[in-house]
Amino acid sequence: FFSEDDWLTDYELSRQAAGDFVTWQHSMFDDVNGLNAPLTERYMAAIYWSFTTMTTVGYGDISANSVAERSFAILGMIFGGFMLSAIISKLVNIMDESNLQQLAQRQKMI
């Protein structure tokens, strides 16, 4: 289990002993395992993590903490993914049309 103290570094253990070490589970759910949080909140945290990881947005120093913030961030990541794919698709179409024009010119010359 990854939350055990065996997985913590010496620095993290010293901060934990001093009382100022906060894990992501404590910061998101106010308990070690997050089991006291409502099911929807746990699912939104999991979906937020997966979309943040898949879209390579990153976690940064500012992250969504509430269900509403996570929902908005997930929609923004989905929208950003669609926009990126639309832009790449348009660029590929432009390049493809350019090649078609060159091919048509070559066909006329033959």
Image (cartoon, rainbow, N blue to C red):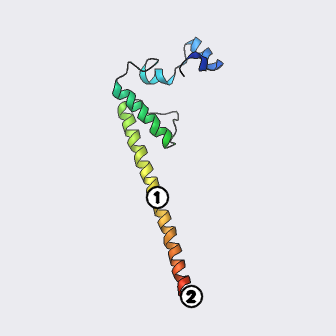
State left or right for residue 58 relative to residue 9: left
Residue at 49% over, 25% down: 24
Kindly identify which residue carries mark 2. Answer: 109
Residue at 56% over, 88% down: 109
From this view, report whether residue 27 is shown above or below residue 106.
Answer: above
Residue at 56% over, 83% down: 106
Numbered label tally: 2
State left or right for residue 106 relative to residue 85: right
Disc 1 versus disc 2: nearer the observer: 2
Q: Are marks 1 and 2 in contact (CB under 8 Å)?
A: no
Kindly identify which residue carries mark 1. Answer: 87
- Which amino acid type is marked by label 2? Met
Quadrant where the C terminus is found in the figure: bottom right
Q: Position of residue 21 (x, y in %)?
A: 55, 18
Identify the element where label 1 is drawn. helix
From this view, report whether residue 68 is shown above or below residue 108.
Answer: above
Residue at 46% over, 63% down: 90
Q: Position of residue 39 (x, y in %)?
A: 35, 25
| Residue 42 quadrant | top left
Work out whether mark 1 precedes mark 2 in sequence or the reverse, and give the earlier one.
Answer: 1
State left or right for residue 65 relative to residue 107: left
Q: Dot 2, crowdedness within 10 Å: few (<14), some or many (≥20)?
A: few
Distance from label 1 to label 2 (Cα)? Answer: 34 Å
Q: Position of residue 18 (x, y in %)?
A: 58, 12
Q: Position of residue 48 (x, y in %)?
A: 43, 35
- Which amino acid type is marked by label 1? Ile
Identify the element where label 2 is drawn. helix
Q: Dot 1, crowdedness within 10 Å: few (<14), some or many (≥20)?
A: few
The mark found on residue 53 in the picture is: none
